[in-house]
Amino acid sequence: MGIRDLPILSIVIFMPLLGSLPLFFVKKERVEFIRGWALFVTILTFFTSLSLYFNFDQNSANFQFQERISWIHELGISYHVGIDGISLWLLLLTTFLGPITVLCSWSAIMERVRDYMICLLILETGILGVFSSLDLFLFYVFWESQLIPMYLLIGIWGSQNRIYAALKFVIYTMAGSLMMLVAIMYLYFYHKNQAGFFSMNLLDLYNLNIPYSIQLILFIAFFLAFAFKVPMFPFHTWLPDAHVEAPTAGSVILAGILLKMGTYGFLRFNIPMFTEASINLAPFMYILAVTGIIYGALVSMVQPDLKKLVAYSSVSHLGFVMLGIFAFTVQGIQGGILQMVNHGLSTGALFLIVGILYERRHTRLIAHFGGLSRVIPRFAAIFMIVTLSSIGLPGLNGFVGEFLIILGTFISSNPYSTIAAIIAASGVIFAAVYMLWMFQRVMFGVVTHEENRYIKDLNLREFAYLIPVLLFIIWIGIYPATFLRPMEGSVKGIVVTVEKKMGKGNSIVFAVDKRITGDWR
Amino acid sequence: MDPLSMDLNLASIAPEIVIILCGFIIILLDPFIPYEKKRYLSYLALLGCSVAIIFTFSLHGKRIVSFNNMIALDGYSTFFDYLFLLIAILSILIACDYIEEERILYGEYFALILFATSGMMLMAKGVSLIIIFLGLEVLSLSTYILAGMMKRDLKSNEAALKYFLLGAFSSAFLLYGITLIYGTAGSIDIFGISQYLRAGSPSALFFAGVAFLIVGFGFKVAAVPFHMWTPDAYEGAPTSVTAFMSVGPKAAGFAAFLRIFISALLPIVSDWSGILWIIAVLTMFVGNVAALVQENIKRMLAYSSIAHAGYITIGIIVADELGSSGLLFYLLSYTLMNIGVFTVAILLRKEGEGYEIRDYAGASIKHPILSLLMTVFLLSLAGFPPTAGFMSKFYIFSAAVKKGYIGLALIGVINSGISVYYYLRVVVLMYMVEPSREFRPLRVGVFTSIALIISLWGTLQLGVYPTGIINLARSVVDVLFYIPLNIGSLFSIKAF
């Protein structure tokens, strides 16, 4: 029996959930065992998920590892999962960050460790489910069910203002997703009327022929759900609160993965299902994305709090992703997806670093630091690499993603693409300003606070979870083809769909594609 | 055929007979049993319910209209028989420990629950408005007494009196509506009424009768603007009774509401759906917004129960198989999750008067399992997947979308968004705030544990794998839509 015969995707999705069940029966005083078990489960999930990568057919644009079991037969709802080149990377990013989140909570979380680990594990299952659902109902179930563990993570283990932040997080996200629920129902009955049978299957819904006026409304309903999640510019106000109050692992998951659920949603649902609406609304999305890039960067500059700074930088980075996706070019979308992964790694690492500082000094204010590079040189080196990756220094991952996005936007045939690309490029400069300035104030100069002289450098455990992240940061920076190649088929599929609706042949896409991405391989 | 000749089919009301007999036996035995041993009466009541379930099961799949078109035994009423017996069993299970602690362990308690249950079952079985009214009265009178069980408690007295006065008022409305309908349609059973409506345009008085019906049922299911009694009655009544009141009469009210409005009044659906639309929207908004500011958990759950009545009403407005089966499904999941919430609320209450929401602060530290259960039930009420609450909302809202009531579905989901706030507030307090009081050591009795397990299992089962129940709900609502034409003309009371 080969590995393809196993329901490997389901095993990956549900392994963390199953792994959390024994914890319910462990005495809560046995914290070492609980941490070890959670680490074991997340590492096991990661290695199992690697088999998805090794068995992935890189030449196919179709969904792979599909599993379909009828769930609620009367309503045409099935348990249907599968991944393509887009979700593959988000899935792997999630399982990769799993052990890291457990490790970074090792000494930061001392209270109610058992409940904490249970929440983390359930959360991981929820996220993995979101990225692999091919049934809208299933997708919505996973989408909503990851809310609660995240809510508890912020609300129980967060800092002073945690309850406010946790509620804000839930209410904002709910507000968006409820609109999506109605839109899903509408689509569902629309499909019944057009095709004659009930189906929540995404692949069936892709074939729908929806008039433009209805597309527009449905687009907006889905847009609300995803824009809150990304978060796009005017919907971002929950993010700084949630990040600042969340424990380190919460921030890592939030920035690293949860935000990508929004951008992923645009790629998976909005663009393929409501293509005409997407094409016509692209300039509008450009405006929001570019505003987000600039606004996020400007606000980051003036933050006195490290975590807030990183949080606002997320708004800026995610603006890049949205820009790339709505450029409708292979480069733009590939860059967007790559940038999702990059942001997960770089910003995740930044939050880890802030968490490490916080654990030692119990403050996150930039003004309380200064001159740390002499005290903790190993920490300084890693921090430097991560900072540079976040800025987009060539040779590190951020550069590849942002470059592809800006390039993809530049050659896009959407109106105002050139202007958007130019403004977005200036965002990279802003990023350099706020990140380097922050780095300078924290790490360089003389030690201004006496307490800072006695900070301990990284320990083995902290190295253990930072080094793998650095490894990938450099890998993507030097040889991105490993990552671009598997997603190519699926991305081209999306671009072809869009080009068809635009009334153009797809020759242009491939010609340009050869010229630009040919040299990555 | 002589209409007075007895069309008695006792088999079709066998479960009701068992329940009523059991109730009488309990009352008769009560004086002979010392206070310490009154608990044994609950075993008897549970036995009665179990026997009734067996009878119901043996009647499963039959379709009999008997007692001169008054009682219909069909899939619809069988479904509700199961539901009501489940409610009765759960109410008895959660009541035992509680009423013993509150020193109101009387035999009447169980007898009244059984009488109320028989009333509810009659309401679901009744196809004649008279039977429905009879059932309603049996149910209401029993519940009035139950609400005033704590004789020395001022609030309990207030609750009983308020519930009684307003309930009597609403019964009068209902009766008046029935009279008007009988007077204009010339028939008291739904077959005759349906035939009258199909024959031609009904008179204005008939519409007045329908309006009064809406008022009457609106009171029973606690729909706005007829909801005024709910918060006070829920707050004052003994909590185990509140749990029963929040699910039993509501389910029975909806059972009769749905049957009359679909089976009899479907031809004039366009005339009543608008009114119900307004009522549903008002009910959702008033319930949810008022619940936001409640400080007492019983009042909060009272407003939440009003809000849920709003969601459930959507199932009637939609007026098709999907909506009706959604209503049935919703009632079942609502029963399970609401009984669950009340059970935990009873267990975690503060000694004496404490049902303030802030008394639940920090409960998760001392009682992690109960807090987890409470969280599951509250999340289900709020409509988070993968719980019964989500499934039933999804079901009923999608029925609305299918019929083109997209606005109604939108208002529904906006309201569930609002409701998240107050349900989560309890979770916030339990998990994220330091305890403000000593939690007493707790011994969860066997009965209570069984009730909790049933409600938890049901809440999750209906959320994760609801196929069986959806199938059942779909198959039983058929009878509402296909009224045999001949039956009404043959045996109508008109023949008098």
Image: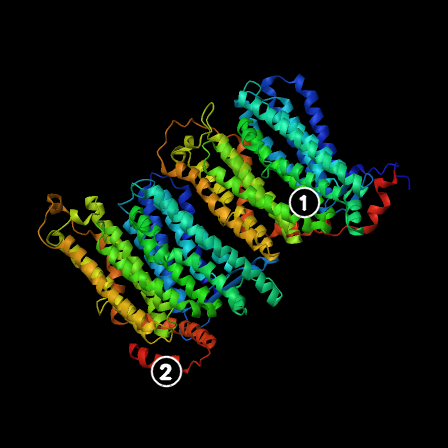
> Along the line of sight, which residue is nearer the eye, A420 or A509?
A420
What is the total number of numbered labels drawn onto the structure image?
Answer: 2
Say whether residue B383 is visible. no
Residue drawn at point x = 41 percent, y = 56 percent: A127
Give how far across and how far down residue B16 sits, in percent: 72, 34
Q: Nearer the viewer, mark 1 or mark 2?
A: 1
B339 versus A45 height, above or below: above
Q: Which mark is residue B258?
A: 1
A66 versus B7 height, above or below: below
Task: Tell me the element at label 1.
Answer: helix
- The amino acid type found where label 1 is placed reads Leu
Residue drawn at point x = 33 percent, y = 61 percent: A318
Give how far across and how far down residue B280 sits, in percent: 58, 45
- The amino acid type found where label 2 is placed reads Ala
> Along the line of sight, which residue is nearer the eye, A287 or A258?
A287
Q: Disc 2: which chain?
A: A
Mark 2 Cα-neighbour bin, 10 Å: few <14, some 14–19, many ≥20 = few
